[in-house]
Amino acid sequence: MSRLAGKFAGILRLTVPEDRAGSLREELGRMQKLGLTVVIEGTAADLAPSSARNLTLELLGRDHPGIVRGISHALAGRGINIVALETASESA
């Protein structure tokens, strides 16, 4: 995660079962109300046969205490495994 030109961005790669991907996209879309822009893209790993789907999640928003915990909790509550996480907070 990083902050550049007054904007905050984070990239998260996660795996979610195919039958739960749609509901995840819906829930993350609701984060717009919190002032977050969420971009979800499939990864090349999606091409490999698997019962799970790999996705890259990129979040951009103002930093505040508990933001990573809140997002992680929301994902974990839906059975989503976070394989790698990068975070950063930088002065605007």
Image (cartoon, rainbow, N blue to C red):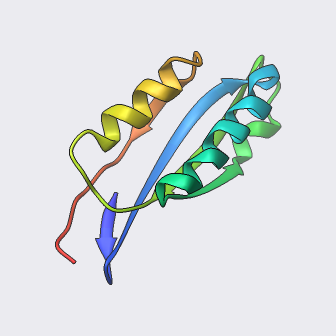
Residue nearer the viewer, 77 or 47 = 77
Q: How many marks?
A: 0
- Given residues 33 and 63, the one toward you in this image is 33
Task: Give the answer, above or below, for where 37 lies relative to 14.
Answer: below
Between 40 and 69, which is closer to the camera in this rendering?
A: 69
Q: Quadrant of the C terminus?
A: bottom left
Q: Is residue 92 above or below residue 32?
A: below
Q: Tell me which corner region of the image, top left, top right, bottom left or bottom right, holds residue 24.
A: top right
Location of the N terminus by quadrant is: bottom left
Task: Determine which quarter of the picture holds residue 72.
Answer: top left
Looking at the image, is 12 positioned above or below residue 3? above
Residue 53 in the image: x percent, y percent? 72, 30
Q: Position of residue 67 (x, y in %)?
A: 32, 43
Question: Residue at horizontal 58%, vertical 56%?
Answer: 32
Report the side of 87 relative to 82 (left or right): left
Q: Which residue is situated farthest in the bottom direction here?
A: 5
The residue positioned 66% from the left and 51% from the top of the image is 40
- Of residues 91 and 48, which is closer to you in this image? 91
Name the residue furthest left: 91
